[in-house]
Amino acid sequence: MTQEHSFQTDGVLTNAHWVAPQGDDRVYDELSDSAPRGTFRLSIPGWIGVAVVVFWIVFAAIGPMVIPWGENDLPFPDAYSEFQAPQPGAWLGTDVSDRDILSRLAWGARRTILISLAATVLAYLVGVTLGLGSAVVGGRIDTILGRINDALLSLPSLMFGLVVVAAVGSSSFILITTAGLIYANVVYRLARAIGMEIVVMDYVEAARARGEGLWWIIRREIWPNARIPLISDFGLRLIFVILFISSLSFLGLGVQPPHADWGSMVRENIGALQYGDSMVPVLAPALAIATLTISINFIVDDVSTYVGGKLSGRV
Amino acid sequence: MSVSDTPVFQARGLTIRVAASDGRPAGREIVRGVDFVVPRGKVVALIGESGSGKTTIALSALGYTRPGLEFSAGSALVDGRDVTGLSRQELGQLRGLEVAYVAQSAAAAFNPAMRIGNQVIEAAILKGTMSRSAAIERARNLYEALDLPDPATIGDRYPHQVSGGQLQRLMMAMALCTGPKLLVLDEPTTALDVTTQIEVLKAVNNAIAQEGSAAIYVSHDLAVVAQVANDIVVLYDGEVMEKGPVETVIATPQHSYTRRLMDAVPKVDVSPGTAPSSDRDIVLEAKNITAGYGKSTLPAVLQDVQISVGRGQAIGIIGESGSGKSTLARVLAGLLVPRSGEVLLDGQVVGSSTKQRPREILRKVQFVFQMADTALNPQQTIGEIIGRPLTFYGGLRGRARRKRTSEILDRIGLPEAFAKRRPSELSGGQKQRINLARALAADPEVLICDEVTSALDTIVAANIMELLENLRRDLGVSFVFISHDLSTVSSFAEEIIVLYGGRIVESGKAIDVLSPPFHPYTRLLVASAPELRTGWLEDVVATQSMRSAAINSAKATAHGCPFFDRCPLAIPGTCDKITPPLQTGPRSVQHVIACHYPIFSDDASLLNFARN
């Protein structure tokens, strides 16, 4: 019997009784009803982002070793003049003090990336621990931490950074600590929100019913589920910290001369826009900041698409 | 063929598959060559277990496939027009105006911040088919057809101000407002209590008859389908197994899968079981439990509840949502500290919270959660989930732990290799098995099962019940089995406690409580369990006890009988003022009924008494 029989007999369409052909020994297993899971794939901008980020990391890692000049060496000590055009021996030209731009860019990459990364890691250590802890413990501790967080969030971050650096002076340690603590506030908020969603799940309740301790619940039940959204936010936070450190340096309160970082390079060489033969001394560090941050953003976009777009809602 | 013969909906060789994306070729066919018709004014049910493709097929009537799927062959004809390839604009006209969808969860379908009435008429006004006043008028008529209370003003309320069953019916009104030719109802009663299910089914039948619209009714429950559908299409793994008029399919099922589905429908069937003797060995006991959430001045959810579980016994707790059964389970497990009363394990008083209970006590009482989806950590493997209690309570590690894990997997009927998988790779039934396995791993004395089959479809639920029976027989574990489904409880538990409004209204041996039922509320529950025959719904709504029962919902009261508002026999001035006395049943002193009425064994003499 074919399925055609059920329709069309004499112009009346009904569901006449019909039975599918059946084997004698067919086993009806329980069907899978789980949704097909997407696999993580990078888009084209994502691939470009990865390429650029890898380029800057490699450049920061081996650039200072390969380039013949140190960050404060003068490639042309005999022909002293500022802002020389790119030429053999100094492929990106020289800066306001006739130092090699390329080598300063490499040293700057190292400093900018390391300081920002350290500050972001610090922000995450503090923010995630307190945020998830707050979500699990709740009650008074949650309220107290929440109010402190509100107070700190109400301060403009750049202003706060300026005041701290102006008061205690600038060093890599101070920069990392200041940026780390400022951004820990934002991370705390996010981690707490994500933690709150997870805490109400039955598997956390099941762990409590089993008698598990607080630390185990945070580490084994909550953290593995908070990890994915938090990791994609880490990239975003890193961008903000890079921009923050660069802004401080541009204002003269970040990395101090004669050391190079990208923000301070833009400031030192800003005169090239008026007096120089080439714009490279300003454009090179500015472009470095822009390409690195935009590239990280491309990667973050792909990750948050995979995570499910929930992240943007929370942020 | 004349125009009037064109069916409202026709699936012709409908095939839906996983779409090609990002260079991957198109995948598995989720639905294969499905043919059926929905004639004008008829209700056609799509029935099958989860994963059978029934919702996917139903959604094709809206020209919709879920993300990642695509129509690959055949057609879905609405009024003779294929809707599988319509443009966005054409779909906009189709959806809501010609075909309307009623989702499973009404709570998720309504915007909590908007008045219900405005949401009901929104589609009609947005699509410009009606003026605002005409739409409001039409909505009112629909509220009336759907048996909703206060049809004139219910539209002014917000979604949280009506009950779950009412919200489900309001969603029907929303779908019907534009006068669609075809309604797609996706498991509209699955999430509801049996008593609420009846009001919704009744309303669905009335509204469809009055509006003359056709409907596709998606369900996994044959007994429910038998009450609403004209024709049945039985699906398994995306293919039609059997189809035909509902009477024919139910009376003479031909396909082995259809018979399987029918066998899985639970019946209210009391097994005499082993009678609890008075000197039985009691494992778990709770005395005078009063519990609630929030401040102690807020009304209590549970009032003065006692329960005792004998060793190796199963005790069933039944009641509708809000009756306090989950609260009782949480108190027993130490997850909620009661306001007063105590919990005893093996005769010893134990701490009221998990923090005060030593590990050995925690091990003996294990809690199995209702939803395996949220009860299993998606980031842990099955091996970690089952292994943790082994380490935590038994100190097993390494090879010993792995060996025990595979033994447990074997016991619950899953292969050893599952230990490496994650919950997302398992089907709903398998996840529920793992959920049980985690509790078993603790080697408990008492398993508290909170609605463990409610979220599952009929066949899977039947398989889980079979597993529970085996565990009980082989391991001698005691069970506290909580469910709103009387038929599931009755076949499993020897003793039953009926909770209503946070109080025990009746308790005793299952056979004494249920055959026949005495308390008016127990009667209502027994009468509400759907039977696998056509015409059951008409019969049951005609009975006395149903008429008043559907109107009001449970509320915790400090005085009188909590069932007063819904009781067909309520005596004003007595039942609402005085706490009902505890009476002993006719056959056993352990059978306790909290009611002002004397105990009668049959309806007729009870009604006679009530009339005088």
Image (cartoon, rainbow, N blue to C red):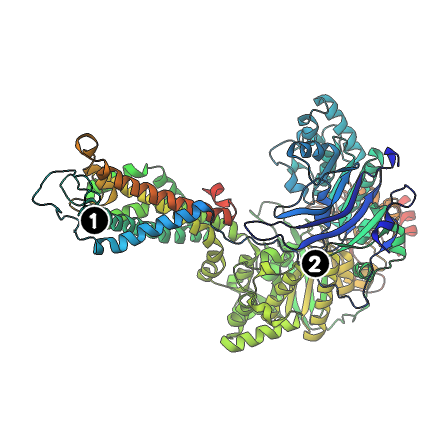
Residue A104 visible to an observer of this rendering: yes
Residue at disc 1, secondary structure: helix
Tell me the residue that label 2 is attached to.
B453
Q: Quadrant of the C terminus of chain B?
A: top right
* Relative image position of residue B543 (x, y in whole percent): 88, 46
Residue at disc 2, secondary structure: loop
Q: Is residue A116 above or below residue A31?
A: above
Tell me the residue that label 1 is attached to.
A103
Q: Is residue B161 above or below residue B286?
A: above
Q: As drawn, which residue projects farthest toward the left?
A: A78
* Relative image position of residue B397 (x, y in whole percent): 50, 75
Residue closest to the eye, A297 or B118: A297
Nearer the camera: disc 1 or disc 2: 1
Do the residues bearing badges 1 and 2 touch, measured as CB atoms within 8 Å?
no
**Label 1 is found on which chain of the structure?**
A
Q: For the residue marked with disc 1, what is the amino acid?
A: Ser
Q: Are marks 1 and 2 on the same chain?
A: no
Q: For the residue marked with disc 2, what is the amino acid?
A: Thr
Residue closest to the eye, B474 or B205: B205
Q: CA distance from mark 1 to mark 2?
A: 68 Å
